[in-house]
Amino acid sequence: MNHSPAPAEPPEPARILVVDDDPTVGEVVAGYLTRAGHLVERAEDGPRGLDLAERHRPDLLVLDLMLPGLDGLEVLRRLRARPDRADLPVVLLTARGDEADRVLGLELGADDYVTKPFSPRELVLRVQSILRRARTAASAASAAPARPLRSGDLALDPRARRAHRADRELALTSREFDLLAFLLRHPGTVFSRQELMQRVWGWDFGDLSTVTVHVRRLREKIEDDPGAPELISTVWGVGYRYDPSGPSGPSGPSGPARDGAATDGAA
C-alpha cells in the first residue's frame, strides 16, 4: 500500500539546504528539489552544513546522519540549541539499520526522516508537505488573536509563537508548539496517533513513532513528573488526552470550559 501523500499544486520556492557527504546522493536530491521549484544549496560535511544553516537561514534542512567533522545528530543538536533556529524544519536521511539514531533525531526535534535507499520523489513530497505545514502555521500565527491560550498555569501566544508555564518560558520546537496548542484547544478528547499526525502534522503518511516521541518531549517540558504525566495522559490502546490543570481548566471570557476548547483570553 502506498502511503505517500497525493501530488499537490507546485509549492512556492523555498530555500533548502542539503547536507550529505555522498556527492551522488547530494546531487540527486538537489536535482529533484530544484526541479520541484526550490532553491537548493549543498554542503558535504557537518561544520559547513552547520555554518550555512546558521548564516543563510534556509527554510528547510535535509540532513544526513553520517557526516564527517560533525555527524548529523550533533548538527541538529547545535541548531536546536539556538533560539533563532529551534524551529527550522529538518528531514533526516538515515541508513535502514539506524533505528536508534532515527529515534534520537526525532527526540532532538527532527520533523521527519527518510531511510536509504529512498525514492527522491518521495523525499520531495515529504519536503513539500512539511513546508506547506510550516507556512500554514506561520499564516495562522500572523492572523491569530494577540491574546494567549490559557490552561491552568500554561499560556500560549499563537501570534508570537511563545509558550510559558507560570513565569517560565518553554523552549518548544515549532511542532511541539503546534501539538500543545492543538491539545489545549481540545481538552478531555482522546486522539489516536494517526489522528494527531493528520491534524497536527497535516500528514496522511509517516512513522507514528514521530508522534510518540513528540508527546514524550512535550511531557518533559510541561509535566512536573514526566514519568507520571498528569496533563497529557495515555489512554491505552487508543491514544492521548489533554487533561486541564488548575481549578478551572482551559478558560476564556465565559469562564471554565472543562470539555470545550481553550479560548483566547485571560484566565
Image (cartoon, rainbow, N blue to C red):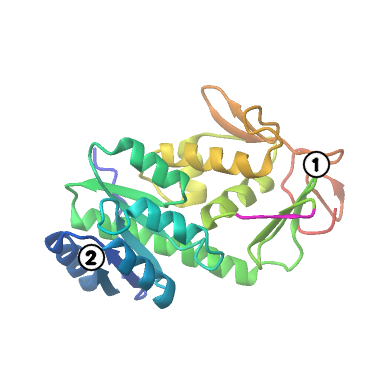
Residue in the foreground of this view, choosing between 99 and 119? 99
Instruction: Check the image and report above or below for 61 versus 267.
Output: below
Callout 1 touching callout 2 (CB < 8 Å):
no
Amino acid type for the residue under numbered disc 2: Glu
The image shows a total of numbered marks equal to: 2
Q: Residue at x 25, y 51 (%)?
A: 66
Q: Which residue is under mark 2?
A: 44
Task: Where is residue 227? Give x, y as percent.
Answer: 62, 28
> Is 168 inside the magenta-drawn segment?
yes
Which range is magenta?
167-171
Task: Where is residue 154? Give x, y as percent.
Answer: 75, 49
- What secondary structure is found at the residue carrying circle 2? loop
Q: Is residue 37 visible in the rendered structure shown here?
A: no
Q: Which residue is under mark 1?
A: 249
Residue in the foreground of this view, choosing between 128 and 69? 69
Quadrant containing the N terminus in the rendered view: top left
Residue in the foreground of this view, choosing between 164 and 249? 164
What main secondary structure does the magenta stretch of the protein show?
Answer: strand
Amino acid type for the residue under numbered disc 1: Gly
Category of crowding for the residue at label 2, using alpha-carbon neighbours closer than 10 angstroms: few (below 14), some (14–19), many (at least 20):
some
Q: Residue at x 83, y 39 (%)?
A: 246
Task: Where is residue 57? Give x, y as percent.
Answer: 43, 74
Q: Which of the 4 quarters of the picture holds residue 34?
A: bottom left
Q: Residue at x 40, y 77 (%)?
A: 56
Task: Where is residue 207? Give x, y as percent.
Answer: 37, 40
